[in-house]
Amino acid sequence: MINIKFHKKPINEFAQWVLYKYFDSKSEYFSSFRITLDEKLIKYTNLLEEDTSSFLKNELDFFYKTNILPVIFYGYIDDYEISTLDDYFEVFEKSSLETLFNYLGGCFLGETLIGDNSGWNLVKHDLNLMENYIKDLPELSEEDKKIILDLYNSPEETKMRIRYLLNQLAKIYSTFENEISDIIDKEEKRYIELYKKDKAKFLDTNWFNRLDINLKSNITINLCISYFSVIGIRINDLSTNNVWGYIGYKNIDAYKYRHIENHFEKFLKLISDKTRQKILFLLAERPWYTHELAKELKLAPSTINYHLQNFVVIDIVSFKEIDNKCYYVLNKENVKLFIDLLNSKLKLN
């Protein structure tokens, strides 16, 4: 079974903050999970527009439009196991130009060209070889070549531009970094609790089933909770034994809505039965023991248990131990989510 370890990685949040506004259709994506964005998140991501000069905005736009802004962060973060902003800037400063331009060129070609690009591995150790490799690519348009080759024409200047851009953004980020750290600490507790309680559900909640990974394999994954990524999962390299990644802090909430959507028809079918309605009305008042419900409704305990198990499957009823007895409790929050979905489908909102 996969072993999960939770970690803090402040540099990841800085990167996600910078990259946030460039992900297409984020608002539509979040709304599909019925996720409402935190007002603080909107406030802080808006600072990328409100607190930056026109020069910085232009630089940000340029580096993202070339599809290389993510690798400027994650090339170093993944390869050097960087955790803090200070560590990042130290590694960036000390690393060679070949390292930087291997990231830039490799990422640009990977995003721009379709097909095999293995030849890059033969030239990535030398600036001139990388530049000539790009120049000689027949599949790459002259316009695309110019975009990336302009960076190779003045490698020191390119590195200086990136350094200045990120330093200025880091100054803005530092004004609220501690608050983001506190939010992540709070959210992390939810995921640790879920992992300890139900590992299989934790993996399903966080989309591990979409990864190319054997969920029964003996592998340790070091995970960070990410505020600015909101929803989703990113894993750096599953081919190694030292796997790092992050999950969005709203994954648990998104899972609930996926669950609600998937079980909506079953919910409607269950509550259409009068006996089940009576059980739900009683559970809405307080926790009930199976035999209590059976006596109250004048039904066999096995019948009551059958109905309860149907509710448990769609997670509107759960267990609670009281005085060494198993009581059933109505999950009112999930019931409300089903009702909200019904209202939405009937356009009553």
Image: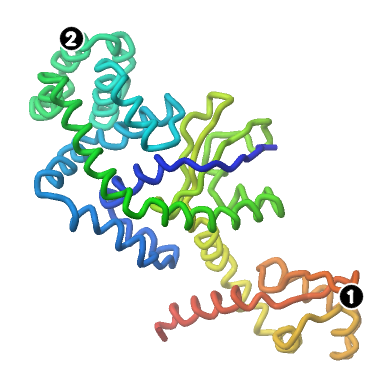
Res. 284 image quadrant: bottom right
Q: Is residue 313 above or below residue 57?
A: below
Q: Image quadrant for the N terminus?
A: top right
Residue visible at 53% across and 24% down? 239
Marks 2 and 1: CB-CB under 8 Å? no
Image coords of residue 178 (percent x, y): 42, 52
Mark 1 = which residue? Answer: 302
Please state which of residues 199 and 304 is positioned toward the viewer in this rendering: 199
Please state which of residues 325 and 336 is positioned toward the viewer in this rendering: 325
In the image, what residue type sits under mark 1?
A: Ser
Residue visible at 13% across and 24% down? 157
Image coords of residue 229 (percent x, y): 40, 50
SS for dot 2? helix
SS for dot 1? helix
Closer to the chain start, of discs 2 and 1, is 2
Q: Is residue 203 above or below residue 85?
A: below
Res. 209 image quadrant: top right
**Alpha-carbon span between mark 2 and mark 1:** 77 Å
Side of 233 relative to 76 (left or right): right
Residue visible at 84% across and 90% down? 297
Q: Image quadrant for the C terminus?
A: bottom left
Res. 149 image quadrant: top left
Residue visible at 35% across and 60% down? 41
Side of 149 relative to 329 (left or right): left
In the image, what residue type sits under mark 2?
A: Asn
Q: In this view, does 197 lie above or below 113?
A: below
Image coords of residue 83 (percent x, y): 45, 35
Side of 211 relative to 106 (left or right): right
Can you tell which mark lies on residue 128? 2
